[in-house]
Image (cartoon, rainbow, N blue to C red):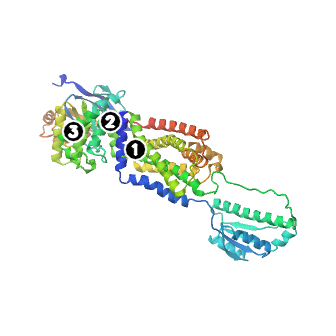
Amino acid sequence: MSEQKETIITVKNLVKKFGNFRANDNLSFEVFKGEIFGFLGANGAGKTTAIKILCGLWAPTSGDINVAGFDIYTQTEQIKRNIGYMSQKFSLYEDITVFENIRLFGGIYGLSRREIAQRATDLMRRLDLEHSRDKLISSLPLGWRQKLAFSVAILHKPKLVFLDEPTGGVDPVTRRKFWDQIYEAADRGITVFVTTHYMDEAEYCDRVSIMVDGRIADIDTPSALKEKYRVKNMNEVFLKIARILPDQNN
Amino acid sequence: MRTILYLIQKELLQVLRNKTMLPIIFIVPIVQLLILVHAATLEMKNIDMYIVDKDLSSTSRGIVQKFESSPFYFINHHSFSMQDAENELRKGNIDIILHIPFGFESELIKGNNSGLQLLIDAINGTAAGLIQSYTQAVLADYNREIMLEWASPGMKERPMSIEITHSFWYNPELDYKTYMVPGILVLLVTLIGMILTALNLVREKELGTAEQINVTPIRKYHFIIGKLFPFWMIALFELAFGLVIGKLLFDIPIVGSLGLLFLFAAVYLFAILGVGLFISTLASTQQQVMFINFFFMLLFILMSGLFTPVETMPDWARVINIANPMAYFMRVNRMILLKGSGFYDILPEFVSVSIYALIILSLAVWRYRKTV
């Protein structure tokens, strides 16, 4: 069924070396338009490295990479116009207000004054943040900040959004709500590329890839993976894969 | 263009809301001017003198009187023992010993050369040099008086002699404050421009907001202009504020054109902001920035001519000083404020600083990477 789907990210033989260390060791995969793609792996498996390369923040050592129809080496700025990004570090400005943050990022993406005002109102209504319009970000609880950061990351209506461990350090209820937001974005046609090490979140993805030691160990839909490894949930899939692969290396 | 305005707006909001930064911007210049101008003085007052007068003649008493009537000397020790005098010098209680040996006057009357001894505490070499020249001037003055008196007793017409009178231009009363205030102003403007800029940029790296900005399609130089412009404004404001304080508190002369001063400062700040930006590309934490800044600031300040004149530096140091932007502004600020120098007088410095700004900004922009 995936043959008819349009790809939005194509990665062939991506290698990123830091000295002798291969953080990304020959990655090849595709992400299809409109899907929620889970990029799983243990801490230090190379997820963040890969996501930073795909966003144009870091240059790869080698490999052919195409994001949103643009080449990673020569068309980085066009890629940046078409993607949104939310990192594991909270990245709105904490010392200015909710609205001022929205205005700043709207302005940077070249939205008009009217568009900014309109989208800001929409966004704050959707997140139930209208009463906090003029509050400093630093005064908001972490869960709210992350929801806001995600909304700001897709303020310019990108084709594709990268979320690097967006739910780190948040309680399960807020995490669940955050995923509602991800579904909403996907419904509006935004492709979601999300890294996480919470395996329950992996169940929410359309397809997942599992990274171990800089390599992709497996990639498929959650149900197919569970079937393949004959286990009940993604947590066990992950444990099996993470245990098998290092053994093969030895 | 609009993007730049959004960035500047954000930057100004951040500074104005910052409850630590805002007071610093106002208080620092006042405190620095008050403390440094008064403390970093090279004026010699209250030189502690120990007199060992073994001659006790009218001539030697004349010399002692000469020193006693000078406002610069403070004489509270007399004795006949060089031993005691040297002990006091060793303890650091006095600055200078004047030793008038026995037979001083009689040798003089016989027409022979007669000698005096000066012993000066030279732990601070600059101060010792000053004390020596002050003291010699007093002695030479007295020497001339007695020569005139003795050479021609009863003569109505005085013999020919060359009398040297002097007047100090641009700072007629040799007021040290007049010299220091413009220098401190340069220090302030540089501090704000260089340290605030570098810290601010690296702070964004630490917080992760720099990454968020780098993932947007913002143009590199839009971002840099948006970042530098607010600090450029703040530093120029700081200069204006410092000048007002200097005028009100110290009544410093403002002889030249303020327009020219601000024109030069505006260009100078491009160079300084460039240095700040460059430093921020070398560092990834605020701690590193502070260390690198400290290293450069110390060199810049000590070689700038703030305390010691650039003209007395060895040649190699003056060559190094070509790369010291502060040295240019230090000179120009004093030239314009105290001397009233015009555009053509400061043209060489103006051209140098412009080239400096161009080079360092290009270097910094080139080093600043959105993709690493």
Per the image, the residue denoted by label 2 is B215
Is any atom of residue A125 visible in this view?
Answer: yes
Amino acid type, mark 1: Leu
Q: Residue at x 62, y 45 (%)?
A: B318
Amino acid type, mark 3: Thr
**Mark linked to residue A121:** 3
Name the foreground residue: B198 vs B243: B243
Does label 3 lie on the same chain as label 2? Answer: no
Q: Secondary structure at mark 2?
A: loop
Does label 3 lie on the same chain as label 1? Answer: no
**Does B358 sit left or right of A61 as displayed?**
right
How much space separates mark 2 and mark 3, taking CA atoms?
A: 24 Å
CB within 8 Å, label 1 to label 3: no
Name the foreground residue: B256 vs B75: B256
Amino acid type, mark 2: Val
- Quadrant of the rendering where the N terminus of chain A is positioned: top left
Query: In the image, residue B78 lies at what x, y percent?
Result: 70, 76
Q: Residue at x 51, y 60 (%)?
A: B35
Compared with A69, B97 (above or below) is below
The earlier-in-sequence mark between 1 and 2 is: 1
How much space separates mark 1 and mark 2, taking CA atoms?
A: 16 Å
Does label 2 lie on the same chain as label 1? Answer: yes
Query: In the image, residue B110 lies at what x, y percent?
Result: 88, 69
Query: In the image, residue A242 lies at what x, y percent?
Result: 22, 41
- Which picture quadrant has residue A147? top left
Q: Secondary structure at mark 3?
A: helix
Label 3 packing within 10 angstroms: few (<14), some (14-19), many (20+) = some
Q: Secondary structure at mark 1?
A: helix
Per the image, the residue denoted by label 1 is B201
- Which picture quadrant has residue A209? top left
